[in-house]
Image (spheres, helix red, strand yellow):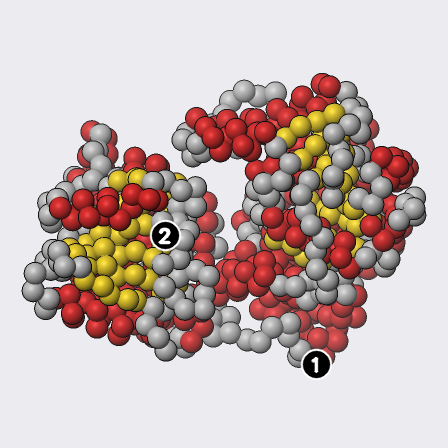
Amino acid sequence: MSSPFSLAIRVDGIATITIDVAGDSMNTLKAEFVPAMNEILAKLETHHGLRGVIINSAKPGCFVAGADISMIAACRDAASASALSRAGQQVFARLWALKVPVVAAIDGVCLGGGLELALACHYRVCTSSDKTKLGLPEVQLGLLPGAGGTQRLPKLVGAIKALELMLTGRQLYAKQALKLGLVDEVVPATALEQAAIALIGRGMPQVRRRRKRNLLEWLLEATHPGRQMLFKKVRAQTEAKTLGNYPAPLRIIDAVERGLADSTKAGYGREADAFGELAMTPASAALRQIFFASTELKKARLVDAEPLPLTKVAVIGGGLMGAGIAYVTATKAGLPVRIKEVNEAAIGNALRYSHERLEPKLRKKQMSRGEFSRQWSRLSGATRYVGFAGTDVVVEAVFEDLALKHKMVREVEEALPGVIFASNTSSLPIAAIAEAASAPERVVGLHYFSPVERMPLVEVIPHAGTAPEVVATVVELARQQGKTVIVVKDAAGFYVNRILAPYIAEAGRLLAEGEPVERIDRLLTKAGFPVGPFNLLDEVGLDVGSKIVPVLEAAFGSRFAAPAIFAKLLEDGRKGRKSGKGFYLYASKGNKGPRPVDDSVYKLLGVEPQPRLAEEELVDRCLLLMLNEAARCHDEGIVASARDGDIGAVFGIGFPPFLGGPCRDLDRRGAAAVVARLEVLTERYGERFAPCDALRQRAASGDRYYPPVAAEQP
């Protein structure tokens, strides 16, 4: 294997180590690179006349994207994973120990192990490019920075800021990193090498923090009582957020505290031990599997056809969804987008949506004035089909009404013959929408989730007659918009809404039985969902859900029947946040604490709220219905694979990431155990809990969706 590192030493004594991992578009650090790095370090340690070292990358837009986490899959126990961590610590310690200044010259992504490499240098300079981002995102994989990051970052920027970065995995733009003291300079790409040489000219830096602390930070970080208070508070906040589902954040806190309170050696030891232990946890295994699956999906050829050219997009309907689709098209895909609406006011609202999201980026200096102008200039609107010439794809985002969508198909085909018509429907069959088209082969479903700019998933739904190149084109559009795409079968509810509907309906039945709203939401949040079902209904709108359920019930029968309470709530005008009236109170102006439940809901429904069910029973009633429906969808080919089903659930509805998705959760629980539990629930509550044939077959055969992994069992 060729070395990913090349060493060049100039006549003036300045050495350059250039990183270029052959065959990969991004540089990642691997365990097998350690000998090559040690060989270079040995040369530098003995080179007479050495003045300084610059570490850079041969790949534009990428310094080092992180460590190759596939290394962990080869580790059979915590000790072998800890050994990976210690090897990284040792080589970076050797770099730091060089007697001459070492400068990391960063252009592009510098994440995870890449930032730990940069932290082991004496100086850091980065380019002002929008592609330059720095961060330690290991927590998102159920891990901690294992090559010294938990020890070096707090000493550089302070414990408070370091913990915030590591506990969230947040990535910083160049100017944010400069303000924090994470880098010493920010320069144009053309000046990167000269800036690095100038930093070498400063000589070895004094041991000092790169960022001034205010009095409160000094008290919390530099005094023993202050540190005790700080770490106690951070632990409490973290425990309240993770609810025991994610062990990595607490281990990050432990490693940082140990390094500050005890010794550097003890801190590194705690970091390596924790890395090994976390690598073997089911949570980390699930999170890493999600990472690999989503990476695969971004590159996978989802249809056997080449996409058509994409130069311009139109959006029909400038409401919440349409405005969001226009925003990601202009800002992420970089394509001009024209919005069609019924009047100027509606166009103004749609454009305002994008401006309200772009302006803060400009104000916070996350975006240059020039880039702001470029992105804003791609957005426009009209009340007639004027200025739509050259449109390749029309994304329709009007109300969920088949007659209205038929009208849009006919209108678009007349105004823009030959264009691809992509409907952002959440439940209506695409074949039914295509019935109104003169070119049904150019009609496809393109289902986004709200809010569009934050939700990472898109479902692409071809009907039986959709042309393959049309599918390939909308897949490419969604990817350019920054979305993870799954292609799903054209059936009622598609995939994500189909598995979500039984979960939501069962929460409604629990409420009808008298279980308190806040308890149902709290227990399902504790189980790992980002929000509870009633909080979700208030955000999305009960009226939106009411459009989907009849379609599902007509297609699949009574197991999708909505509880009667939902109709009562709609009759009372309870559409959630948008109507100021839902399951929770929206008139209250207080911002502290959770939003209070609107107790008038109970009076309206004629129930007396009182906890009755055991926690496990309550959660099982909602969650197992979702798992059962996911198994049906996989068996029916609604999703192409277990991978697609799991990514769809995690990215589309926030299925608990630490469980890895419905199929991985079924593997973890065991199909036989799930079938047995569903049979118990069927006896107690009715046929909607009957295990599907696909689950029964897996229970009998012992088949799994995925091969077992070392860390699968808790």
Residue lying at 78% horizontally and 59% vertically, measured from the top left? 468
Query: Is 344 displayed left or right of 279 in the figure?
Result: right
Place of residue 240 in the rendered image (x, y in percent of width and height, measured from the top left) = 44, 44
| Residue 692 visible in the picture | no
Q: Nearer the viewer, residue 41 or 286?
A: 41
Q: Which mark is residue 110?
A: 2
* Local crowd size for mark 1, using a 10 Å CA cut-off: few (<14), some (14–19), many (≥20): few
Query: Is 585 displayed left or right of 159 in the figure?
Result: right
Q: Earlier in the sequence, mark 1 or mark 2?
A: 2
Q: Amino acid at mark 2?
A: Cys
Q: Which mark is residue 701?
A: 1
Place of residue 207 in the rendered image (x, y in percent of width and height, measured from the top left) = 12, 46
Q: Nearer the viewer, residue 144 or 345?
A: 345
Q: Nearer the viewer, residue 25 or 401?
A: 25
Q: Nearer the viewer, mark 1 or mark 2?
A: 2
Place of residue 641 in the rendered image (x, y in percent of width and height, measured from the top left) = 68, 66
Residue at far front of view: 11
